[in-house]
Amino acid sequence: MSPDARARAAAWLPQSREIAWGISVAHLVRLGRTPHLGHGLDDDGAVSHALARMGLEGLRERAATRLSGGEQARALIARALAQEAPLLLADEPIAGLDPAAQIATMRVFARLAEEGGAVIASLHDLGLAARHCTRLIVLSRGRLVADGPPRTVLTPDLLAEVFDIRAHLSDTPDGLVFQPLETLHHSGGF
């Protein structure tokens, strides 16, 4: 598979979020369209849609280097969304975002899945994973230890074994709620 074909098949959002170019937010997001150049697709529409999804319409002309850290993270997510690949691979996409932006981003990812796309994201926030993901895969020491819906994966035994924590889990009308309570072996998690 050629690099362009691979980029049309999967968008990659790395954990590193440094933006070194003084280009506009719209130009940064348009870089996500690079794999589609020459294919006659609506690049302007894709960029506008990605900016709107991430709540960045009002910042489209601002230099990307002049954004706050959270705004830069959202701009890079928008760049990946503008790629319009059927698969989005995201490494810690909500790290560094404020709580409202974390929830909004998880809802954007859920809508992508509802629209037929696939989103694979590494997350350490089990609360957001429990509430917004349809499937969790838990890895520990390089091996798969659980795979399934959040309600079946996030068990007291798994949380103790993998994360060394005790947590409160509760089904609510709004979905599953997860709250870590304490470490079990007082290792401090290290």
Image: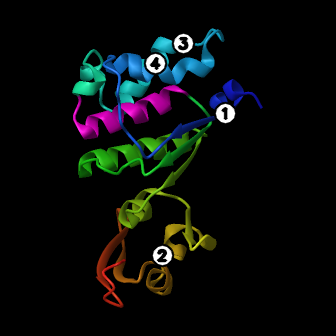
- Please give the label number shown on residue 91: none
Find numbered disc 3 in the image and state the secondary structure of the residue it sits on. loop
Q: Nearer the viewer, mark 1 or mark 2?
A: 1
Magenta region's main secondary structure?
A: helix
Q: Which residue is mark 4?
A: 30
- Judge by depth and name the residue closer to the eye, 27 or 136: 27
For this orientation, the residue located farthest to the front is 20
**Residue 178 colored in magenta in the image:** no
Q: Which residue is mark 1?
A: 9
107 w.r.t. 152: above or below: above
The three-letter code of the residue at mark 4 reads Arg
Q: CA distance from mark 1 to mark 3?
A: 17 Å
The three-letter code of the residue at mark 3 reads Asp
- Magenta region: which residues? 67-83
In the image, residue 52 lies at what x, y percent?
35, 26
Q: Which residue is mark 2?
A: 154
Instruction: Categorize mark 4 by other alpha carbons within 10 Å: few (<14), some (14-19), many (20+).
Output: many
